[in-house]
Image: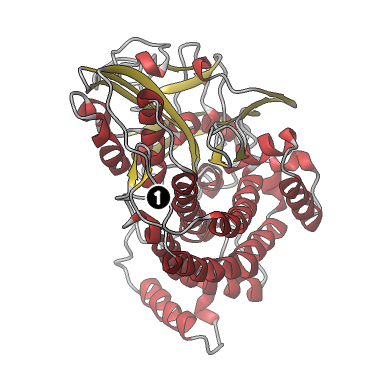
Amino acid sequence: MNKTLTLSPITRIEGHLAVKVEVEDNRVARAFVSGEMFRGFEQILRGRDPQDAQHITQRICGVCSVEHGVASVLAQEMAFGAEPPANGRLVRNLIQAANFIMSHIAHFYLLSAVDFVDVEAVSGYQGKDQGLRELQAWVKSQLASKLVSPIAPLLPRYAAKYLQDPDANFTALRHYLDAFEFRSLATKMGAVFAGKLPHAATLVAGGVTERVTALKITQYKSFLAQLQSFIEQAYLPDVVAVARSFPEYFSVGQGCGNFLCYGVFPESGDNQAKVFPAGVLIGEKLGQLAPDAVTEDVAQSWFSSATGLRPMDGETTPAPTKGGAYSWLKAPRYNGQVMEVGPLARMLVSYHDGRNPALKTAVDGLLKALDKPFKDLVSAMGRHAARALECKLIAERCGEWLNQLAPDSPTCRECTVPESARGFGLTEAARGALGHWIEIRGRKIRNYQCVVPTTWNCSPRDDRGIPGAVEQALVGLPITDAENPIEVARIVRSFDPCLACAVH
């Protein structure tokens, strides 16, 4: 088979993504990933009060909103010379952790699991579970109708191999239905300290505005216990079941082989010691993070602004008719290198860093359960495994942070906006490395730049013509049927793209 396939839009992701693959001899020879819209948040921020930034940037996304808020206040704190008290740091961790848990559960069940779980098999379900009975009735009605929507979340689907074990399949479908409730529960948990979610109201430079009380700690603990039960009894077992049924996805989708992590969940006031440490992994060599090594190319992006700039000096000038361009994403690079970001990157950097023995034990245990060598983590299925394991580890850490909170102690320190200053905030969203850069002149925002996880992963080719991380992950992928290229969708969704963020 020699053919060009275009999947547009890629469904069950956040935002508008198109993927074109050129197939030669039944394998992807070249891939082109395109962000199809422009939003302009960086222009919206110019001239505004810096302390508005965390509220505006959270509107970049309804899923990753908390992380944008955290990145923004970290950038402001660097510019203001401010630092939150211990309670403020811990509460931020708890809000951000809740958003991670919500996002991970949503990604596997609501976005990716349908690529592996046989939805149509519920037509033959003979059990008594009311949720599955209702799903069965809906599926039958859809299959009988000629009006099946092409964007329905479950149907239609690609004709392909799905989970073969009926018990495992029905269990996963039951958990798919449960995931809606647990996703909501994680949001409620974060809102205990965020005021509301999505778009936390309490994040400010200097800490958070919400008081810590014994009642709020108890509320959060109650939600957390329910989520931990779902993660350990449903999420992780379902990922293992899918991984065992689709072992071939441990040998495809490897990508560029370079991994970047900014670090997240600070354990001390200096923002240095973190649960997931910052680092750059190229091959087997772990290096320290150098923020100045981040640049953005725009040669094949619909921007006429200068290329190769560091974010602090970044420009965003849209050019929708630019020749040779094919995406509204810029092409971030680290010392000129393509980098993958996300849960797999965090897991690999932390594993090689070695300062978190609990993480190493958890990774080794999961690999043993899957009967896979460490190298197989760098794969499409490895991304799902890393995300599920991270979800468990973060939930466990939440319990420790709750025990460290001091009720009625300060959560915020007052900040003063300087006449002129620069700062950047580096953190991690559920989908990977997230950075905000701010320049202040006359106590107003002169320039603001965001480099977000999916801009890294789904970037187009850079100035040297080197493909981005997802583009590289698709190369070499076997395509069984050009009319049902589910293999492409499975690889792309393993990165959990958020195009709303990427095109900000």
Lateral position of residue 201 relative to residue 429, left or right: left
Q: Residue at x 57, y 69 (%)?
A: 230
Return the residue nearer the eye: 327 or 92: 92
Lateral position of residue 496 relative to residue 24, left or right: left
What quarter of the picture does the C terminus occupy?
Answer: top left
Percent of width and height locating residue 340: 57, 31
Percent of width and height locating residue 48: 19, 28
Q: Quadrant of residue 360?
A: top right
- Above or below for 224 versus 492: below
- Above or below for 420 versus 350: above
Return the residue nearer the eye: 63 or 273: 273
Q: Residue at x 18, y 24 (%)?
A: 47
Residue type at numbered disc 1: Thr
Q: Which residue is mark 1?
A: 11
Lateral position of residue 297 relative to residue 358, left or right: left
Lateral position of residue 371 relative to residue 241, left or right: right
Return the residue nearer the eye: 405 or 450: 405
Q: Residue at x 54, y 14 (%)?
A: 336
Q: Residue at x 42, y 42 (%)?
A: 67
- Above or below for 178 versus 269: below
Q: Residue at the bottom extreme? A: 128
Mark 1 surroundings within 10 Å by alpha-carbon count, few (fewer than 14), some (14 through 19), many (20 or more):
some
Q: Quadrant of residue 268?
A: top right
Return the residue nearer the eye: 265 or 379: 265
